[in-house]
Amino acid sequence: TKLAKIDPQFSMSAHDPVRAKRAVSNDDARLTSRKRKKKTSTCPPPPLLQCSLRCCPRPLVCVSFSSSQGRAGGRARIRIKPTEARRIGKYKSVGARAKVRYDKDGIATMHRSCYMALAEAAGTPDIGSMHEGKDCEATKKDAAKAIAAEGGVGRSEARALREAAELVEMWDSEAEMESKADAVFRLLRGGNGVTSAGSPHVIAFTGAGISTSAGIGDYRGLKGKWTEDDLGLAVEAKTTEEDDGVPYEDLRPTFAHEALAALVADKTVDYIVSQNCDGLHSLSGVPDSKLSELHGNVFREYCEDCGTEYQRQCYVPRDDADDYYSQLSDYGKTDLERPWGTRQCKQCGLNHRTGQRCSKEGCRGRLRDTIINFGDNLRPCVWDPAEYHSERADVVLALGSTLLVTPAAHLVLKGGGNLVIVNRQRTGCDRQAAVVVRGDADIFLQKLMARILGDREGGLAGFLEQCARKSGRYDLARRKD
């Protein structure tokens, strides 16, 4: 079974409370002994996470158990090469000394205002397009003064920061997230420039970012596959992939999947276009008539001859064949034995045959997986309905995608409707968007669903209970071969 690489999410462990007896005088104890039967206790305040900018005295955030994971203010996270981080950390002179504390992987987390000041000091271009937010300006000037007082950013660190700017991850503050949820709610209800008669035509465009909390690694995140390739960590990533993996059959829908399925069911969202092949949209209950999985589905195969499709409970692609044909394409030879029932695809150079036969009477054709590799053409039966709905969209919810993979990314601008982007990183369409949310799709959709549901059916709490009850059905829909 192929393993989906886990993207280690940024997490903060909670502080274990320590019970302490309240100091009470003997007189008070005698007076209240009959009334107070339980010992009272006080808990220390939750621990504070330090901002990675060395000259910043403010704590980054208090750890809490809120829905936004305790992130009260805007936050930014960057990553430079670990070797660069270690080398910069050895400099002792005031000007060259590292201005940021990096962890062993070269990752640093700081206030968004601190990052903006740091990026400007490092000469990062196009800072103005980062959607700083209202809470950012007030403290950015103070951070800039503190950085200048320490001699500015050294040349080596400035160069590393400029290279890392393209992949910086940001989170909006709690207040910004609430305000943007209100704005998107109005768009879904037909306000703010939606011109179509009646309800607006709404589509959702989803990328790898909505599945990271399920256990699947993304590509361009700070620990994504392509990011680690660019940082020269590809060899290390390959050696640890199986240790950090989870079978596709064990993956379950995230809150974002559940919310989108509910919005499709109540006709708030008319269609979903997905770049993901994990099958979680289908598993969450989105019908095939409302879904285009542009890059395929690892649980779906179809007949080469008659086109009949089959939805399976287990992973269908042949990874052993991909290994064989990859080595054959890269080196012209391989020591691996050619897997039975496979054939090299002329377009992508890999194999699509699953080894199964069509069960339709009178056919018996060979079955193929639906995965689209680099070089493969998108299937018309999947692309055409996606294009149709995109051209008619009044509102497009682009969730968890950097909108860089074409031609899929072109769909979000086809209809000229209001574009809403929810992503940690900058995308290629930020300037064209009506609303840009920096953060996780799960968190933003919780706030949006709270507004859509209101008090209906128990509100957001009731919806979360319904999602929890689906786990048994999901287990029945998946099995390991």
Image (cartoon, rainbow, N blue to C red):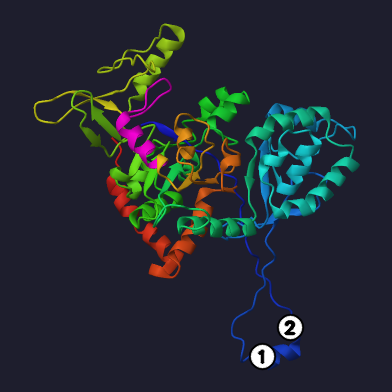
Is 160 rendered above or below residue 413?
above
Based on the picture, tell me whether residue 373 belongs to the magenta stretch.
Answer: yes
Which of the pair 378/480 is nearer the observer?
A: 378
Residue 24: which numbered mark, if any? 2
Which of the image's four quarters has the N terminus?
A: top left
Disc 1 crowd, CA 10 A, few/some/many (<14, 14-19, 20+): few
Relative to 247, say whether 20 is above or below.
below
Q: Secondary structure at mark 1?
A: helix
Q: Amino acid at mark 1?
A: Thr
Residue positioned 48% across, 34% down in the render: 409
Residue 234 at x, y = what percent? 56, 24
Q: Horizontal placement of 220 versus 19: left or right?
A: left
Q: Quadrant of residue 365?
A: top left
Residue in view at x 79 percent, y 27 percent: 156
Residue 282 on the magenta span: no
Q: Are marks 1 and 2 in contact (CB under 8 Å)?
A: yes
Task: Characterize the local packing of mark 2: few (<14), some (14-19) or many (20 or more) Cα atoms within 10 angstroms.
Answer: few
Extent of the magenta region:
370-390
Q: Nearer the viewer, residue 13 or 454?
A: 454
Residue at the image point whose x is 53% and y is 54% from the top: 443
Viewer-nearest residue: 79 or 194: 194
Quarter of the rendering occupied by the C terminus: top left
Q: Residue 148, how many percent across, how many down?
A: 88, 41
Q: Measure the alpha-carbon separation of dots 1 and 2.
A: 10 Å
- Give the residue number, with chain letter if any, for mark 1: 32
Q: Secondary structure at mark 2?
A: loop
Is residue 42 depicted above or below 91 in this figure?
below
Residue at 55%, 28% in the rendered image = 226
Tell me which amino acid carries mark 2.
Val
Q: Position of residue 217 (x, y in %)?
A: 50, 37
The disc at residue 191 is: none
